[in-house]
Image (tube, grey):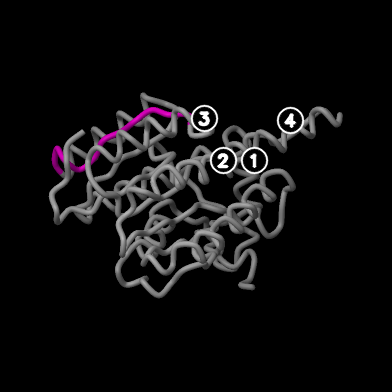
């Protein structure tokens, strides 16, 4: 990959090919950063990187295919990222509710919890830990993607995102003295993503919008802007926090 200049911030975004991840990668690239997007689907990653290069220059973006639940693949992805120099920002966006139902058996329930834990917790933890040696000190920023589900369910997905909160707190305490911050963003309903798939019927979307106090869905760009703030020098005093962005569906706590 191309080595960034000393002035150019380097940002890693997992799940950066679509939705919130892609909007986040675009926001950083527009601000002059070099972005590396990671994920499992080469086609969407390549398309995202090519679009960013076309808009912001040939050094704006790169990509790497990796299953971030697999330690060996995470190690290889981290080595690829590190070959370009120190990392300023890590955004762990990969994940989602990958187990929306089960057959009611204990085996099915166990499988759902394992799958959501792997998709949402392991992807965040393994990537972060692999990149920690390469994160800039002082000034490094870690931002995890959580969810409104962490404070209201459903169980396996919400529980996995709540575990991301606990990991965020651990990182903040562990890394604060080194000048590295760790925070999480917990969106409510966000339109324009693949998250809900075929469930996102007009009726389904209406119920989610009706639950807000603002009468509108969130947008990927709004979540990306919050991530950018937490990753900025202006947020050096913000660490160990969960930023809820949900239109008032769940009030602050």
Q: Mark 1: few, some, or many residues within 10 Å (few <14, many ≥20)?
A: many
Q: CA distance from mark 4 to mark 1?
A: 10 Å
Where is mark 2, residue-wise? Answer: 122
State the image coordinates of residue 253 (x, y, percent, origin top left). 64, 73
- Which range is magenta? 57-67
Mark earlier in primary sequence (4, 1): 4
State the image coordinates of residue 139 (x, y, percent, origin top left). 31, 64
Mark earlier in primary sequence (1, 3): 3
* Identity of the residue furthest to the top in this view: 43
Q: Nearer the viewer, residue 169 or 200?
A: 169
Q: CA distance from mark 2 to mark 4?
A: 15 Å
Q: Nearer the viewer, residue 149 or 72?
A: 72
Where is mark 1, residue-wise? Answer: 117
State the image coordinates of residue 134 (x, y, percent, origin top left). 32, 48
Where is mark 3, residue-wise? Answer: 70
Q: Is residue 59 above or below residue 219?
A: above
In the image: residue 95, left or right of residue 76: right
Residue at image position (44%, 56%) is 143
State the image coordinates of residue 140 (x, y, percent, origin top left). 34, 59
């Amino acid at each position: 990959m191309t080595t960034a200049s000393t002035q150019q911030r380097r940002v890693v975004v997992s799940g950066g090919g679509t939705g919130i991840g892609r909007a986040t990668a675009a926001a950083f690239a527009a601000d002059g950063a070099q972005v590396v997007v990671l994920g499992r689907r080469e086609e969407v990653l390549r398309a995202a990187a090519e679009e960013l290069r076309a808009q912001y220059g040939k050094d704006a973006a790169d990509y790497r295919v990796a299953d971030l639940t697999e330690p060996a693949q995470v190690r290889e992805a981290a080595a690829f990222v590190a070959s370009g120099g120190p990392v300023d920002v890590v955004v762990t966006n990969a994940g989602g509710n990958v187990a929306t139902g089960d057959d009611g058996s204990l085996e099915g329930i166990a499988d759902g919890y394992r799958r959501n834990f792997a998709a949402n917790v392991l992807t965040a933890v393994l990537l972060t830990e692999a990149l920690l040696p390469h994160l800039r000190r002082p000034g490094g920023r870690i931002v995890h993607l959580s969810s409104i589900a962490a404070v209201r369910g459903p169980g396996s997905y919400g529980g996995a995102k709540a575990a991301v909160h606990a990991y965020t707190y651990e990182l903040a305490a562990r890394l604060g003295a080194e000048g590295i911050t760790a925070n999480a963003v917990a969106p409510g309903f966000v339109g324009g993503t693949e998250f809900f798939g075929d469930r996102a019927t007009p009726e389904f979307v209406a119920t989610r919008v009706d639950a807000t106090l603002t009468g509108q869905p969130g947008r990927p760009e709004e979540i990306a802007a919050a991530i950018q703030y937490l990753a900025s020098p202006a947020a050096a005093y913000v660490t160990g926090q969960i930023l809820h962005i949900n239109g008032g569906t769940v009030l602050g706590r």
